[in-house]
Amino acid sequence: MILNPYHVAGTTATRDSVVVGVGDAYTQTRVALEIIQGALAEAGARLEDVVRTRLFVTDISRWEEVGRAHGEVFGEIRPASTMVQVSALIDPAHLVEIEAEAVIP
């Protein structure tokens, strides 16, 4: 069986050059995942095809907000997931950046 991998690069809660959910890690996570879902759809993949996510956060103490949003979006899908704290992201208003990998046969 040949598998087709799809990689979505670091995605933040930025729409039309504006950071959405400034100061709100939960909202930023939801928006970033919505953007990832759209990118996957354009490539012919779905959230159900995601096998791994990487979440980069600027404040690990907010892990519950980020994890709750991630869990709500993925539900029973349960991709392998890693969350790490980084010292900064490209825009100081960004609290979360997410990468995703999907595989479809």
Image (tube, rainbow, N blue to C red):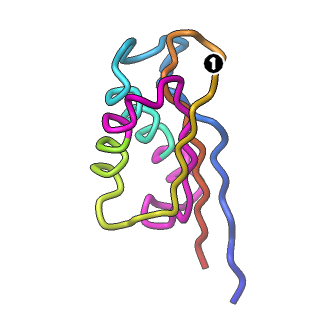
Provide the secondary structure element on which disc 1 rests. Answer: loop
- Observer-nearest of 22 and 86: 86
Q: Is residue 88 left or right of residue 25?
A: right
Q: Which residue is mark 1?
A: 88
- Which percent across, then down, holds residue 61? 40, 29
Please give the name of the residue rendered at 66% of the width and 16% of the height, measured from the top-left corner. 90
- Which percent across, then down, holds residue 10? 63, 36
Please give the name of the residue rendered at 47% of the width and 63% of the height, measured from the top-left corner. 79
Identified by mark 1, the residue type is Ala
Q: Is residue 71 left or right of residue 101?
A: left
Q: Which residues are magenta?
A: 37-66
Q: Is residue 56 magenta?
A: yes
Please give the name of the residue rendered at 57% of the width and 39% of the height, measured from the top-left corner. 84
Indicate whether 37 appears above or below 56.
below
Image quadrant occupied by the N terminus? bottom right
Asked which quadrant contains residue 28, the reply is top left
Indicate whether 34 appears above or below 41.
above
Q: How many numbered dots are placed on residues in this image? A: 1
Please give the name of the residue rendered at 35% of the width and 56% of the height, measured from the top-left corner. 74
